[in-house]
């Protein structure tokens, strides 16, 4: 990553994670600032979502195979980001995701 792209990449990374996990927005911002690994994971999610959104530009002969690959990557990254967020919340029992879950 080039240094001049860092702020834009970070914004896209945070946005991708917050779209999927809005209840953890504050934790996402904190983790992205604190953990390069978490930021990289969120950046990968943003890039995979972008690639999936542009799948119609792929030649028709390979479009469905690429769509499946990108969707699988997006799903895997969502699971990984979610696992980190839930583990982080479990380490901080006083932190309650907003809005609270309704039972």
Image (cartoon, grey):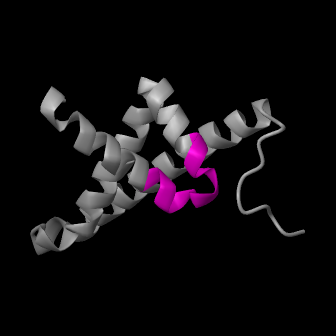
The residue under the point 58% across, 45% down is: 26
Task: Decide if residue 88 is on the left or right side of residue 64.
Answer: right
**Residue 96 versus residue 2 in the image, above or below:** below
The residue under the point 83% across, 37% down is: 93
17 drawn magenta: yes
- On-image quarter of the N terminus: top left
The residue under the point 46% across, 34% down is: 32
Q: Does residue 80 appear in the picture of this structure?
A: no
**Residue 60 versus residue 87 in the image, above or below:** below
Q: How many marks?
A: 0
- On-image quarter of the C terminus: bottom right
**Splitting the image into 4 quarters, where does residue 100 fall?**
bottom right
Between 92 and 59, the residue placed more toward the observer is 92
Tell me the chief SS of the magenta region. Answer: helix
**Residue 17 versus residue 83 in the image, above or below:** below
**Residue 100 versus residue 11 in the image, above or below:** below
Between 87 and 33, the residue placed more toward the observer is 33
Q: Position of residue 38 (x, y in %)?
A: 47, 32
Q: Position of residue 102 (x, y in %)?
A: 84, 69
The magenta stretch spans which residues?
A: 16-27
**Splitting the image into 4 quarters, where does residue 27 fall?**
top right
């Amino acid at each position: 990553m080039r240094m001049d792209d860092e702020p834009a990449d970070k914004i896209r990374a945070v946005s991708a994670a917050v779209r999927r996990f809005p209840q953890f927005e504050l934790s996402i911002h904190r983790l992205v600032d604190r953990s390069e690994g978490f930021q990289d994971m969120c950046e990968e999610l943003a890039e995979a979502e972008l690639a999936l959104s542009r799948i119609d530009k792929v030649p028709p002969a390979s479009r469905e195979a690429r769509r499946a690959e990108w969707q699988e990557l997006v799903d895997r990254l969502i699971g990984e980001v979610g696992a980190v967020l839930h583990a982080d919340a479990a380490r901080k029992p006083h932190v309650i995701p907003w809005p609270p879950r309704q039972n």
